[in-house]
Image (spheres, rainbow, N blue to C red):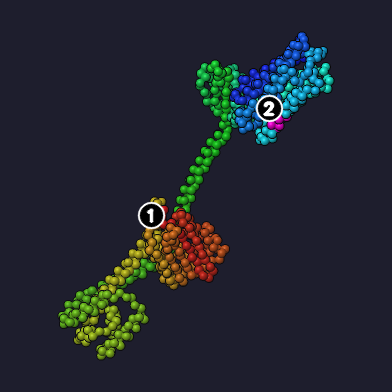
Amino acid sequence: MRLVSLITFLAAGVYIYLAVYGLRMKPRRRLNTIFIYLCLACALWACCIAFMFSASSQTTAWWWFRMSSPGWCLGPALLLNFSLVLTEARISSQLKKHRFWIYLPALIFTVLAMNKGLTANTLTLESFGWSPLNTGQSLGYWAFTCYYIICIVSSIALVWRWATGSTLAREKKQARIVITCTIIGTSLAFFNESLLPVLGYTSIPKMPVVLWLIWAYGLWVCITKYSFMVVTPLVATNEIIRSIDDLLIMLDLQGRIIEVNPRVSELLLFSYEDLLQSNIEKITDDPDTVRNHLVISQNDPSHTIHEEIQLKTRTALAIPTAVSISAIKDEFGDVICFALIARDLRPTLALQNEIKERIRAEAELKQAHTEAELAQRELAESEKMAVLGQLVAGIAHEINTPLGAINSSVGSIAEAVPQTLEQIPGVFSLLTAAEKQEFMQMLDIALKADAVLSMREKRALRKNLTEQLEAADISRAANYADSLVNLGIYEYTANMLPLLVHPQNELIFQALNNISSLIRGVKNIQTATMKVRKIVFALKNFARFDNSGEKVPSDIREGIETVLTLYYHQIKQGTEVLREYDEVAPIPCYPDELNQVWTNLVNNALHAMDYKGTLTVGVKELHDRGELMVYVSDSGHGMTAEIREKIFNPFFTTKRAGEGSGLGLDIVKKIIEKHEGRIEVESEVGQGTTFRIFLPVAS
């Protein structure tokens, strides 16, 4: 067999191998089918040409040449169809019905070539064997040449357009390989097959089918390296294995490493080549555990082992990992290798430590918060007691006053009772029925009199009444006027005349004075007792501290009145209090803490006015906002903007040393925030200050 024949037979063998490879490719696609047909066409072409070279006669050689025509006539059409299917799914789906038009010229040329040769007029015997000869005078030859060029150029253009429109580097790389190999292979084949004979170079073997192997090489690279320009399960699997963050180590039945993913080399610092065929001891100090698990998996392939094992790096650094080992079986059910998947536990352990540290920090923060609340509560209580201490002297004075009144009234009553008991029977025996009625009438007026008169008012009433008595010709009018005013009788009436002119009038009026003195003493005792009771109640409410930690419905106005009662001894010195209260329902709050708010605001307002001015306290319900507004205004000297910005800072105070701690407004703000409310302040130098507190009316 001649050398050229052997080379051509080898080319046929390569084409057949590619066809078989394409037949076994998965998934099965129309692209695979066209590729298989194209390889078989080239194999037929190469096989016939090989026999042509070694033919014993021209007739036999001519027959083999004509038998090769289906290969080189259908090849360009198959290549064009392959490019269409590869690059444009929409066009290829339309061509399913019209693909006949792609192959029609190829079929016509095949028929012509099998009858007349088409690209050769005759065969000549050269040193290498029979060689086709064409003078270039045949119309069919040039028609086929144009058809050949159109198919090849169109295929290259389609692949080029597909590559430029793709965003994947993988597809661009494959397109460059296919285009380069197609141009080189088909150009050399066309030059060798068609142009050289026309130019008269007949001594060169005509082997375009061998030169087409350059094109076949390009496809072979794409098939073996890129899985034929399409994403197959194998490609997807390889890419998934490469991209996963876990370490994947494939072990053979003896525990040797046969494959790893890139993550193994990155983490363990071993090169890919260093790991292949290495024993498991290379990457762990606990190989026996791994081998024991391999034995278990080999005996029970369905069993998956999960274990925590330390892997070691090239620098002997131990890395804690969570390892799972699974047996890999072939289609016959035999275990062929093992897949060891390891996950680096350092991020998980770090996260667990971070969580533990955060839990510990949160516990410490909670404890600190609890201690801060306790300290705040103690501080508030201390501030309350400090305020109460400042009020003690005034409150003691306020209690002593009614106690003195009680003591005085008790003495007066003690003196008046014996005299009155002795006088009443004698007086009543001296009076007529009409006089008794007038006596009781005057006594009733005395009982109802409850006005407390100043000395000026009493003098004016005595003077007026004296004039009335003198006008009625009553002797000793001034003395009787004084007795009547003391009884609470300020107007003279004619009914009084019988008693005024009665022979025993002095005894009668002495009895009336004694009885009225008793009544006034009792009333004084009642008034003083109520005043003391009110002060004690205010002290009790203010000093109490509720530790339940739960809000209770409370009337804000009652708390404000409690505070005003405690400050009464300071207010009465020269402060006018204006109360502007709306009718409001009780709101959920911490009453004891709010009392401390009102105490601080009232105390600051009185201090700002030097206890002389107008104190305005108001309670308004803002229905549209669901809030209750409490405001405390004074007519004091006001604050500058600089001071106003600092008033809520702890320990800041404008009072003299010893008069304030600077914690009052800081505590006020914290109490209001605890109630989910807010506090606003408005102040102008020389005009006074207004604090507004907004509290939610519902929890």
Residue drawn at (76%, 23%), measured in percent from left and top? Answer: 141
From the top left corner, tell me how far across and down residue 423 is, in percent: 20, 78
Residue 486 as seen in the image, left or right of residue 328 = left
- Residue under label 1, please give it: 552
Residue drawn at (33%, 71%), measured in percent from left and top? Answer: 405
Q: Residues within 10 Å of mark 2 (few under 14, many from 20)?
A: many
Residue drawn at (58%, 33%), measured in percent from left and top? Answer: 346
Residue lying furthest right in this view? 200
Residue 387 as seen in the image, left or right of residue 130 = left
Upstream in the sequence, badge 1 or badge 2? 2
In this view, the mark in front (1 or 2): 2
In the rendered view, would you say 618 is above or below 484? above
Q: Is residue 289 visible?
A: no
Highlighted magenta segment, given as a residue range: 152-160
Residue 80 tag number: 2
Residue drawn at (55%, 60%), measured in percent from left and top? Answer: 646
Is residue 156 located in the magenta-colored stretch of the structure? Answer: yes
Q: Nearer the viewer, residue 132 or 308?
A: 132
From the top left corner, tell me how far across and down residue 189 is, in percent: 76, 22
Residue 530 occupies quadrant? bottom left
Q: Amino acid at mark 2?
A: Leu
Q: Is residue 494 visible?
A: yes
Q: Nearer the viewer, residue 69 or 264?
A: 69
